[in-house]
Amino acid sequence: MHDKTGRFVLYATLATLMGSAHAVESSFSGFAQLSVGRVLGGDPTSGQGGSAPYPLNAKPGYSYTCSCFAANYEYAGVYEYHKTDIKSESLAGVQGSFKFSPAVSATLQLVARGVDSSVEADWAYGTYKINDNFTVQAGRKRLPLYYYSDYMYVGYAYPWIRPSQDLYAWQIYSYDGINLMYSENIGDWTISANGWIGQRKTKDNALLGRLYYSTQIDESWKKMAGAYLDVSNDIFAVRGVYMHTVVERYSVSNGVRSLVMTGANGDFVNNVGQAFYGISLNMDYRNWIVRSELNYIDRPSVKNTYTAMSYSGGYKFGAHTALLSWSQFRERAAYWPNGTEKHSTTSLTYRWDFASSQALKVQYDRIKDESKFLFTGDANLLSASWQTVF
């Protein structure tokens, strides 16, 4: 099922449910952020030689002047060398919840993004509450691979301007399928678990086509099966997640689809198995906050692995918060050792909650790019963001 067909089915399902209901309780909420940033300076990828600026070319119609900073990989929101930009991360979203009965409801979330002037449904699913502990949902949801997956674009919900893009950066970020959720309170602890199955097909994938390849890329993750367990109280939150899926990737040029992933001896491969492991440990103790997350992705059939991690520590004083963060992404590949990606980011963030449900954030990011190919390069980004929920 093509991506547009999938969206049509999801919207039609929700419309049918709403149209058939005699009395619907509805509620709406929203979020927005206006962000501005500028790459102050930098150098090409370590070991590549040359000097900045230099072009990072992608498919026709897209080219970036680097050294640059990828502030959002999912939609290729890139701050370019010595350019001030307000489109890369600015966005607004609205979420509608429609309750048809005590047990049956539907959710639709639309997000408008400045980077490509698009309006997309990040969420479009129906919910059936089995009992106080179990809930089943079906439709389109964000993949809950990361601690902040559910709030990825609700900037007000986390302390930084953006979650670390060394870690929160994959070409497939949602799925069409079904999931079963469980929640229970035991003393001071809350236990949440979720298991899901599904698939996701993307045509002209933004991340791959605009940042890594010079042509259109169609990417599919098939046979998804995953689960997470979250245990938390007022101080600690611990979360573990696992997912397995099958990756299919084609380039498209003049209507011709061709395989692009390679394995042993440079042979083209398809239907590559991929296992995702993740763990996070967070703490809020008095005025101190700690955020940590680690992911490991393994593609054994092509001897390719990815490790991503992010660590932050900060202190709250009244309406103000200051954090120091470090994160890293590293790829290992036996069959293409000279084409692997590696970069790390050191960040300093200041947050001011100056009004109810509104925050102003200022952040300085210093990225070190040690990839084996000419990528974004070393870059220093200064950015600011007004973020709100309503």
Image (spheres, helix red, strand yellow):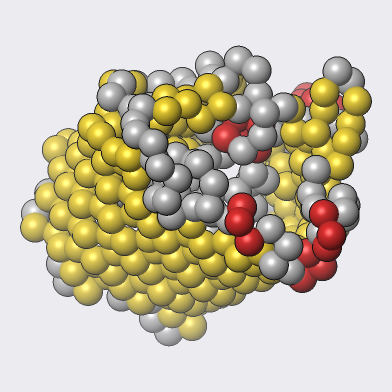
Q: In this view, does 249 lie to the left or right of 321?
A: right
**Quarter of the image containing the N terminus?**
top right
* Occupied quadrant, residue 58: top right
Instruction: Residue 231 in the image: state x and y as whole percent.
Output: 49, 77
Q: Residue at (61%, 65%) from the top-left corner?
A: 332
Q: Residue at (28%, 55%) from the top-left corner?
A: 346
Q: Residue furthest front?
A: 49
- Nearest the camera: 118 or 352? 118
The answer to whether one can see residue 48 in this image is yes
Instruction: Residue 205 in the image: state x and y as whole percent.
Output: 69, 33
Q: In this view, does 157 lie to the left or right of 299?
A: left
**Quarter of the image containing the C terminus?**
top left
Instruction: Residue 340 in the image: state x and y as whole percent.
Output: 58, 56
- Nearest the camera: 83 or 117? 83
* Occupied quadrant, residue 87: top left
- Nearest the camera: 364 or 184? 364
Q: Residue at (27%, 46%) from the top-left corner?
A: 365
Reply above or below: 173 against 370: above
Q: Residue furthest left?
A: 317
Instruction: Residue 274 in the image: state x and y as whole percent.
Output: 75, 63
Reply above or below: 7 against 332: above
The answer to whether one can see residue 79 in this image is no
Q: How many marks are shown on the rendered structure?
A: 0
